[in-house]
Amino acid sequence: MQERSITNALTIDVEDYFQVSAFAPHIPREDWGGHECRVEQNVNSILLMLDEHKTKATFFTLGWIAERYPQLVRSIVENGHELASHGYGHERASDLSEADFLADIESAKKLLEDLSGQVVRGYRAPSFSISEGNLWAFDCLDRAGYCYSSSIYPIRHDHYGMPDAPRFAHQVRPGLLEIPVTTARFFDRNWPASGGGYFRLMPYALSRWLLRQVNQSDRQSAVFYFHPWEIDAEQPRIDGIDAKTRFRHYVNLHRMEGRLRRLLADFDWGRMDKIFLAANDETSAMKKPEVIS
């Protein structure tokens, strides 16, 4: 039985396999250019899959990627998807000063807008790295002209998380929404229900059940995310990483595309801006135009 009463947000964090935060100790940013880039072919495969399922999504895109693959950015927009910002160089917000964070999100936004001709309204921090210690990041996002963020994961995790944060979209500054990725609430605790490595690790039926609980019990749209490298089982392996990192990154890559196709068939999906900003469209339009001339 398909869930058709609520439209959920499908989001893709556009970064390549060698740019994930867990690999940072092994692959310095200055060495990124020496690695085989596979993001363009993977994003093209995702665009074809979404087209087959008549689905629109939001692509949180790194400025570093956009700068090297401008046609990728244009293809996202030309296919009717939302282009959003993932920052420039995949630096965690919690590792940056306020001034450096502002510079990062401003430069990424301008680059994406210049390449696409579209206003960038949304931002997602790498590794969901906004939490209690750097809530000033929302002031920076407001100053930079963003309308929403999807940067908080309300769970406990060894690398990120803000478990006491609201589970659903809420205003963090006037005109600025935080739209967390989705959790399900059981036994007085938030449980991951929004994709990433959990989606590859858990049986598909469990992921589908958790999302349906959010739709049916909470009556809320879910926010699901994945990365282009997660559909690429043939990606080069990184040497020297520990067993936990290896497991988290590579588990069930070969099953990911099939699971995504089932997910696209089992739920209705759409863009973040269309789902969460519709009520604020008039305000957002006054704040900044839809298209850059």
Image (cartoon, helix red, strand yellow):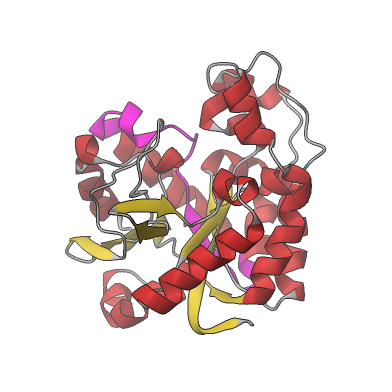
The correct choice, above or below, for 213 with respect to 63 in the image is below
* Residue 59: quadrant of the picture: bottom right
Count every numbered label the image shows and give the total: 0
Whether residue 43 sits left or right of residue 141 in the image: it is right
Whether residue 16 sits left or right of residue 105 in the image: it is right
* Residue at the outermost left position: 174
Q: Is residue 57 magenta?
A: no
Instruction: Specify the segment rendered in magenta.
Output: 77-100
Residue at 47% over, 47% down? 86
Question: Residue 145, image x and y in percent?
Answer: 30, 58
* Residue at the outermost bottom position: 5
Q: Nearer the viewer, residue 213 or 153?
A: 213
Residue at 33% over, 69% down? 288
| The N terminus lies in quadrant | bottom right
Question: Residue 138, image x and y in percent?
Answer: 24, 49
* Residue 100: quadrant of the picture: top left
Residue at 56% over, 18% down? 28
Q: Is residue 57 visible?
A: yes
Residue at 35% over, 73% down? 218
Q: Is residue 291 visible?
A: no
Q: Is residue 88 magenta?
A: yes
Q: Nearer the viewer, residue 152 or 61?
A: 152
* Residue at the outermost right position: 234
Question: Residue 157, image x and y in percent?
Answer: 39, 36
* Residue 251: quadrant of the picture: top right
* Residue at the outermost front position: 187
Question: Residue 271, image x and y in percent?
Answer: 51, 71
